[in-house]
Amino acid sequence: MSLLIEADHLTRVLPATVPVTLVRDVSLSVDEHEFIAITGPSGSGKSSLLYLLGLLDRPTSGHLRIAGQDTSSLNDDALAHLRLEMLGFVFQFHFLLPEFSVLENVMLPMRKAGRLSSTAMRERAASLLEELGLAGHLDKRPDQLSGGQRQRVAVARALANDPHVVLADEPTGSLDSKSSEQVFQILRDLVKKRGKTVIAVTHDMDIAARVDRRIHLVDGRVVSDERVAQAAV
Ligand SMILES: Nc1ncnc2c1ncn2[C@@H]1O[C@H](COP(=O)(O)OP(=O)(O)OP(=O)(O)O)[C@@H](O)[C@H]1O
């Protein structure tokens, strides 16, 4: 296995009259093919840590290497490029663009990356959506879909540029239990069938019980980091 993410004493402090420490001295490494949940009480810094690991925020101190590259010396453009190449994101609220079709939403990250022709982008987006059970919905607008379907579109969009790591912030937080289970199965398949690494912030204990590794935060610190053997399913 090769190391995808190496966090070395990451700390993130929000400057204010009374500074707020979101993430405290977090060191961890993440390999290929890992399925990880970040758990912890509300306000413990889960989203803040995910944002640091996903290059959406910068640490106040400490170092973060992605695929061996130290990100502290990279400017914003280089970080954006690394993000596009390596990482995909799924948020609690899907953030799909309402005026674009489902297909166009999934094509957007490919347009940003600029690697494929229009036809190839269209074909890849359609094929990802079909694999996620959305074959009949490509030309619909996001508001014509259910919450679970929209979240599956968000997963397809996260996969658009074939990232190594998918970072998910409460991916099932706004879904009913059936849709949550579908999204969980999809995330698990990303790891088991497509060889991705998935890191999901979750309050959902049912999900946390079924991942391969749980990182538990309290007050911005990692208080436990345990690998769990799961029965094959
Ligand atoms: N922009 C901000 N300004 C002030 N405080 C902030 C800001 N962003 C986060 N915080 C605080 O930092 C702490 C960590 O927030 P974070 O969202 O990372 O926690 P979390 O574990 O993801 O919480 P939740 O489970 O409720 O989403 C919280 O106490 C939060 O209130």
Image (cartoon, rainbow, N blue to C red):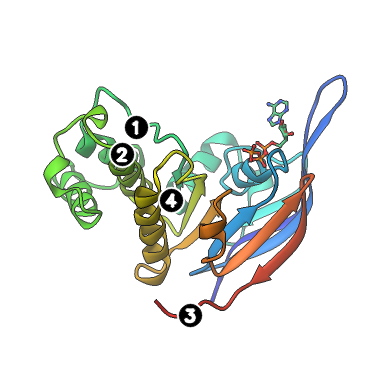
Q: Which mark is residue 85?
A: 4
**Mark closest to the chain's N terminus, 4 or 3:** 4
Placement of 220 over or under 21, stated as above or below: below
Mark 3 element type: loop
Circles 2 and 1, Cβ within 8 Å, touching? The answer is yes
Q: At label 4, which amino acid type do we have?
A: Glu
- Rendering coords of residue 157 (x, y %): 33, 44
Mark 2 element type: helix
Q: Residue furthest front?
A: 177
Real-space Cα separation, disc 3 to disc 1, in angstroms: 35 Å
Real-space Cα separation, disc 2 to disc 3, in angstroms: 30 Å
Real-space Cα separation, disc 4 to disc 2, in angstroms: 23 Å
Residue occupied by mark 3: 231
Tell me the residue at 48%/69% (across/down): 33
Real-space Cα separation, disc 2 to disc 1, in angstroms: 8 Å
Cβ of disc 1 within 8 Å of ligand 1? no
